[in-house]
């Protein structure tokens, strides 16, 4: 049941529990209880909204920042990751396998704001060896959602 | 000038759906629940394989029967899903959609005057294809009280000395009915006793919501008298690729292949390469689509219950078949008014046989969001009709 609920609300978190109950063929009370349980367990961490900020008048830049790090004895990457993710402008922090260690996504109002964060805050941290900042120019697809124009239903109106 | 036309063809009634289609196409802003094909795009990895085959220059005819690689994959799939073994070299024919398989089978098997049992409501092509093949269609009218399944009694009553083929269209378009194992066992006995053949159109076999589809060919004694028709259109959302297949005893497949060889040559090559990928790596896509359809099916059934509209619960395909007899309108009158007043297109049940009178086919090959809008309008319409009736 959990997987079924999650599959639906991952795509549309606004589906109410009544509708979920109908679509999944389960009693509404069970769904309400299960979702509360999943919130407690930290499986459901939030109900966000997909926004295409490019279509708003708000100025916003997003950057992906690669960070190479010297892991600290006994602490690994966790302490540094925590120091980074506590900045509210940092949207995500991942530990990555391969050529570098941490991948950060960050949002700022301007390029300057992002580059100041990188030069003043990030690269000056003790264990950071190097950074590489990539600015996002266009989002084609995000969170499984294609950001370009919706396509029309091209099927004929009536077919046997 | 002489009459250039063949009487046999001229006398075939145009599809009931065609007439309604003409009305709908006049209305630009109507929303439709009238489509008999998936709303999903063909999964990308399948499309990509089709594109790749074109890039590699795979643009030639395949063998008449179809790519050996595809026939082998089909046999592997049938072994796994149906539990029946077919020989790729002699018992499989790749066709242009399931439709071609139906046509070729009837033409390969019918002598003039042979009777073909056609349960209705059902897909529109069985009757005309039977006539074109020189056979005589005999309609079995399925009943809502039996959940539109074919019962042993109905079958027995329709059989004469001339009966040769039973068409078995389950999971069913337009009713969404399925035949479960026990239903099939009951009719299999009669089929064997009366020495009939079965043309089993299982194009919706992957879309069932109660238990897994059972194919009649998997029952004892049935494989040697069954032509199994299936294809890629519904399961993998590949309608436009026009690809299906027929499996059966090699004597019948050989004659069908002869017809196919002269009329078609071979099924589209690009589609065949894409289909190999569909069978190899498409299970997850089918499962996802089936899950989405099932949610919509439950959503519609619930909406009908709330409207107080009678509808038996269908467990297959992607159609519901609600009953509208309470309004005292014909299916066509209901559908026409619904279209004109609420701008929603549904298909009158009569498009699928006279016994579809009093029913509508509503397709749920639409997103939940679309269904919500359409159902909202249906609710208004149903309430208005009830108010009119009580006035």
Image (cartoon, coloured by chain):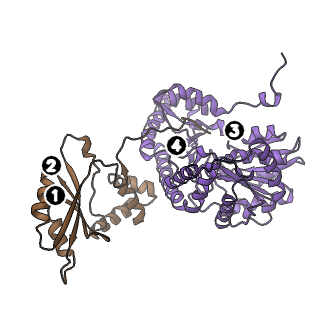
Chain colours: A brown, B purple
- Residues B48 and A18: in front is B48
The chain letter for the residue carrying disc 1 is: A
Nearer the observer: mark 2 or 3; the answer is 2
Residues under numbered marks 4 and 3 in contact, where contact means CB atoms less than 8 Å apart: no
Nearer the observer: mark 1 or 3; the answer is 1
Q: Disc 1 to disc 3, how far (Cα)?
A: 64 Å
| Residue located 73% across and 60% down the image | B216
Task: Report whether mark 2 lies on the same chain as mark 1.
Answer: yes
| Residue located 38% across and 59% down the image | A28
- Reading the image, the residue beneath label 2 is A110
| Residue located 79% across and 54% down the image | B253
Question: In which quarter of the view is residue B110 placed?
Answer: top right
Classed neighbour count for the residue bearing mark 4: other residues with Cα under 10 Å, few (<14), some (14–19), many (≥20): some
| Image quadrant in which the N terminus of chain B is located | top right
The chain letter for the residue carrying disc 4 is: B
Q: Please tell me whether mark 4 sits on a helix, a strand or a loop.
A: loop
In the figure, is residue B381 to the left or right of A123? right
Q: Which x, y percent locates residue B197?
A: 81, 54
Compared with B34, B247 (above or below) is: below
- Reading the image, the residue beneath label 4 is B309
Residues under numbered marks 2 and 1 in contact, where contact means CB atoms less than 8 Å apart: no
């Amino acid at each position: 049941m959990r997987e079924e609920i999650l599959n639906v609300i991952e795509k549309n978190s606004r589906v109410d529990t009544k509708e979920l109950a109908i679509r999944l063929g389960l009693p509404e009370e069970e769904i309400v209880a299960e979702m509360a349980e999943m919130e407690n367990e930290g499986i459901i961490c939030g109900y966000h909204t997909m926004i295409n900020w490019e279509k708003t008048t708000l100025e916003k830049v997003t950057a992906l920042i690669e960070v190479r790090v010297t892991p600290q004895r006994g602490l690994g990457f966790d302490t540094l990751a925590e120091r980074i993710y506590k900045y509210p402008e940092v949207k995500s922090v991942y530990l990555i396998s391969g050529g570098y260690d941490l991948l950060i996504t960050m949002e700022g109002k301007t390029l300057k704001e992002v580059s100041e964060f990188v030069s003043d805050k990030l690269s000056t941290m003790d264990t950071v060896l190097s950074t590489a900042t990539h600015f996002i120019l266009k989002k084609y697809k995000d969170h499984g959602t294609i950001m370009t124009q919706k396509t029309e239903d091209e099927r004929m109106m009536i077919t046997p | 000038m002489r009459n250039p036309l063949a009487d046999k063809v001229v006398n075939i009634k145009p599809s009931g759906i065609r007439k309604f289609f003409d009305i709908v196409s006049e209305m630009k802003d109507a929303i439709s629940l009238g489509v008999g094909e998936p709303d999903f795009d063909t999964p990308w990895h399948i499309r990509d394989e089709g594109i790749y085959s074109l890039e590699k220059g795979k643009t030639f005819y395949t063998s008449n029967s179809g790519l050996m690689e595809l026939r082998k994959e089909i046999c592997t799939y049938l072994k796994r899903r149906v539990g029946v073994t077919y020989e790729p070299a002699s018992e499989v024919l790749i066709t242009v959609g399931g439709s071609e398989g139906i046509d070729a089978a009837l033409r390969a098997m019918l002598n003039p005057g042979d009777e073909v049992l056609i349960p209705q409501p059902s897909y529109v092509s069985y009757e005309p294809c039977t006539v074109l093949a020189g056979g005589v269609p005999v309609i079995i009218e399925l009943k809502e009280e039996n959940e539109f399944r074919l019962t042993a009694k109905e079958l027995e009553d329709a059989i004469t000395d001339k009966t040769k083929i039973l068409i078995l269209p389950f999971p069913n378009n337009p009713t969404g009915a399925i035949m479960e194992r026990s239903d099939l066992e009951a009719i299999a006995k009669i089929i064997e006793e009366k020495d009939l053949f079965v043309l089993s159109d299982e194009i919706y076999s992957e879309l069932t919501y109660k238990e897994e589809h059972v194919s009649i060919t998997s029952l004892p004694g049935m494989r040697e008298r069954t032509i199994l028709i299936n294809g890629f259109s519904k399961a993998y959302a590949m309608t436009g690729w026009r690809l299906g297949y027929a499996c059966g005893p090699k004597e019948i497949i050989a004659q069908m292949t002869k017809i196919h060889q002269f009329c078609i040559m071979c099924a589209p090559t690009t589609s065949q390469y894409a289909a190999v990928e569909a069978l190899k790596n498409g299970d997850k896509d089918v499962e996802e689509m089936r899950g989405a359809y099932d949610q919509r099916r439950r959503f519609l059934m619930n909406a009908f219950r709330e409207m107080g509209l009678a509808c038996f619960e269908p467990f297959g395909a992607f159609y519901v078949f609600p009953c509208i007899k309470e309004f005292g309108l014909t299916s066509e009158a209901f559908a026409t008014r619904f279209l004109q007043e609420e701008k929603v297109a549904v298909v009158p049940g009569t498009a699928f046989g006279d016994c579809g009178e009093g029913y509508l086919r509503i397709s749920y090959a639409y997103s939940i969001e679309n269904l919500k809008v359409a159902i909202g309008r249906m609710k208004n319409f149903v309430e208005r009709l009830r108010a009119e009736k009580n006035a």
